[in-house]
């Protein structure tokens, strides 16, 4: 085919909340981007072609094509396939040969779930273990399990935009969507996970029948199969831990109701289900990683550099809290997922505050909260996942020590740690490292496998590649 189109159509669903900021702050410090939809009398979304003055309008979230295209482009192996850059329009030679629609909602989250949800964010002072002064914010997210439609058109017009290249790119994007990918803000803490079903079609402008089908928007008889050759970048450098845990005593990641008759605080929910939030997981991991590094070596600056090169960093003002406008950002290489918490009971617990001087109850200090209590002999936290991109031996060693602390009930997650909440006990885990798979607790029976993982922990003490972290930070500073 010399002149025609390859068309990708997909039905998507977000498996986790999506946060793509709009620049507005009407509902939170950072509201999600929205657009007008046509809806019927029951607030069900109507197709875009129904948009007119005859139907009610409603502001709802959507995924801008720019966010989606930017994310997908970074997955391709541009260094070895420069032709992708030309086809995408990222070079100065030509505009893009890809037309991508904004990804619009077709169905709202069901079962009475809210379309959006507000999450609170804080930054913990690692020295004190409390919230840093002024480091409190909130942000708006699109709730999980909404459905979307995506349409992409790949133009076939000349040698630069030939059929084989267009089909390879379309096939790779189809695989990415079917396997699942993430987009939007805070993807390193599990937000923005989308997945869907994809179909590919072709239109050959040399065939009059195809032209008529193009005009009629009837692609039923024009479907094609994906090609197997891939232009995506290799993901072999990812180090991954997937584990299951039980809650030892209780857990609460606090959220507060606007209802004055409701308990003062309850455990965090997303889409109506109890979750272990990615930000809580990653915050706990980073805090403990800092303590481990400070124990292994006394140089605070070296610890700061390793953490920034691994967990990411943003440039701050002199107060150490306020993010500097137009400052540099070092992206995190550590990715965690939000995890559903199952097999738990929600029970209201009443607490008081004691006056240390009199030994009596402080007036009005009666607190009601709803923590989660585990059902006996059940794994409450499954598919607890940590991934590291471009993992160095030191990174792997640090993650293994963090897994050990989680496994042995030494690293609590969430709030009210001082009264025993948030403690987990390991049940099983799988570590994937460059094609090798290690299974816990079976690994303790194999001396050779244990020795391989111990070598990563030893790398933390040897610290031969500290320069990698400093170089990475300097790279992003220079891009500012």
Image (cartoon, rainbow, N blue to C red):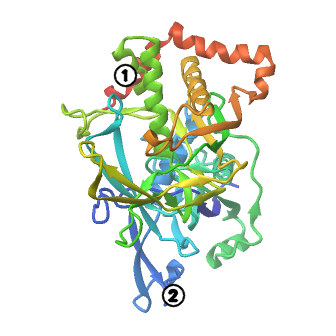
Q: Secondary structure at mark 1?
A: helix
Image spot of residue 73 (x, y percent):
53, 44
Q: How many marks?
A: 2
Q: Is residue 89 at all visible to an observer of this figure?
A: no
Quarter of the image with the N terminus in it: bottom right
Tag in front: 1 or 2:
1
Image spot of residue 216 (x, y percent):
64, 79
Q: Is residue 220 above or below residue 422?
A: below
Q: Which residue is mark 2?
A: 42
Image spot of residue 294 (x, y percent):
42, 17
The reply, left or right, for residue 18 in relation to residue 157 is left
Q: Secondary structure at mark 2?
A: loop
Quarter of the image with the C terminus in it: top left
Question: Residue 138's image quarter?
Answer: bottom left
Q: Is residue 172 above or below residue 78?
A: below
What's the CA distance linking mark 1 and mark 2?
A: 53 Å
Image spot of residue 209 (x, y percent):
73, 73
Give the residue at x 52% y 34%.
334
Q: Is residue 176 at all visible to an observer of this figure?
A: yes
Give the residue at x 29% y 46%.
359
Q: Nearer the viewer, residue 268 or 452?
A: 268
The reply, left or right, for residue 428 in relation to residue 392 is right
Give the residue at x 51% y 81%.
49
Q: Residues within 10 Å of mark 2 (few under 14, many from 20)?
A: few
Query: Mark number for residue 224?
Result: none
Q: Nearer the viewer, residue 310 or 358?
A: 358
Q: Residues within 10 Å of mark 1 (few under 14, many from 20)?
A: some
Q: N-terminal of the two: label 1 or label 2?
A: 2
Give the residue at x 59% y 39%.
424
Question: Residue 261's image quarter?
Answer: bottom left
Q: Marks 1 and 2: CB-CB under 8 Å?
A: no
Query: Mark number for residue 304?
Result: 1
């Amino acid at each position: 085919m010399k002149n025609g189109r390859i068309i990708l159509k997909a039905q998507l669903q977000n498996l986790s909340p999506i946060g793509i900021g709009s620049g507005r702050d009407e509902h939170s410090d950072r509201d999600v981007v929205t657009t007008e939809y046509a809806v019927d009398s029951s607030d069900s979304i109507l197709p875009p072609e129904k948009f007119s003055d005859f139907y009610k309008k409603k502001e709802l979230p959507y995924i801008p094509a720019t966010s989606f295209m930017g994310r997908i482009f970074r997955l391709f192996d541009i260094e070895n396939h420069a032709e992708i850059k030309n086809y995408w329009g990222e070079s100065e030679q030509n505009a893009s040969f890809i037309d991508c629609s904004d990804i619009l909602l077709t169905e709202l989250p069901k079962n009475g779930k809210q379309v959006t949800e507000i999450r609170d964010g804080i930054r913990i002072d690692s020295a004190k273990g409390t919230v840093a002064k002024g480091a409190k914010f909130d942000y708006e997210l699109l709730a999980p399990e909404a459905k979307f439609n995506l349409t992409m058109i790949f133009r076939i017009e000349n040698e630069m935009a030939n059929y084989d290249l267009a089909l390879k790119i379309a096939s790779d994007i189809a695989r990415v969507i079917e396997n699942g990918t993430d987009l939007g803000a805070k993807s390193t803490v599990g937000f923005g996970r989308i997945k869907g079903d994809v179909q590919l079609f072709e239109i050959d402008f040399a065939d009059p029948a195809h032209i008529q089908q193009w005009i009629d928007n009837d692609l039923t008889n024009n479907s094609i199969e994906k090609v197997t050759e891939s232009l995506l970048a290799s993901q072999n450098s990812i180090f991954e831990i997937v584990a299951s845990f039980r809650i030892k005593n209780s857990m609460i990641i606090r959220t507060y109701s606007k209802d004055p008759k409701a308990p003062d605080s309850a455990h965090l929910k997303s889409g109506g289900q109890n979750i272990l939030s990615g930000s809580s997981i990653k915050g706990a991991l980073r805090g403990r990683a800092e303590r481990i590094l400070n124990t292994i070596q006394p140089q605070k600056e070296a610890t700061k550099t390793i953490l920034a090169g691994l967990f990411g960093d943003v440039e701050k003002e002199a107060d150490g809290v306020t993010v500097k406008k137009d400052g540099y950002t070092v992206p995190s290489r550590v990715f965690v997922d939000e995890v559903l918490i199952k097999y738990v009971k929600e029970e209201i617990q009443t607490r008081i505050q004691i006056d240390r001087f009199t030994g009596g109850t402080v007036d009005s200090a009666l607190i009601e909260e709803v923590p989660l209590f585990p059902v006996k002999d059940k794994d409450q936290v499954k598919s607890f996942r940590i991934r590291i991109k471009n993992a160095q031996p030191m990174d792997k060693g640090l993650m293994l020590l963090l897994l050990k602390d989680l496994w042995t009930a030494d690293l609590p997650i969430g709030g009210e740690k001082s009264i025993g909440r948030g403690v987990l006990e390991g049940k099983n885990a799988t570590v994937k490292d460059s094609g090798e798979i290690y299974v816990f607790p079976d690994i303790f029976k194999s001396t050779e496998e244990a020795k391989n993982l111990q070598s990563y922990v030893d790398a933390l003490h040897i610290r031969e590649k500290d320069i990698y972290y400093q170089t990475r930070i300097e790279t992003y500073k220079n891009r500012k």
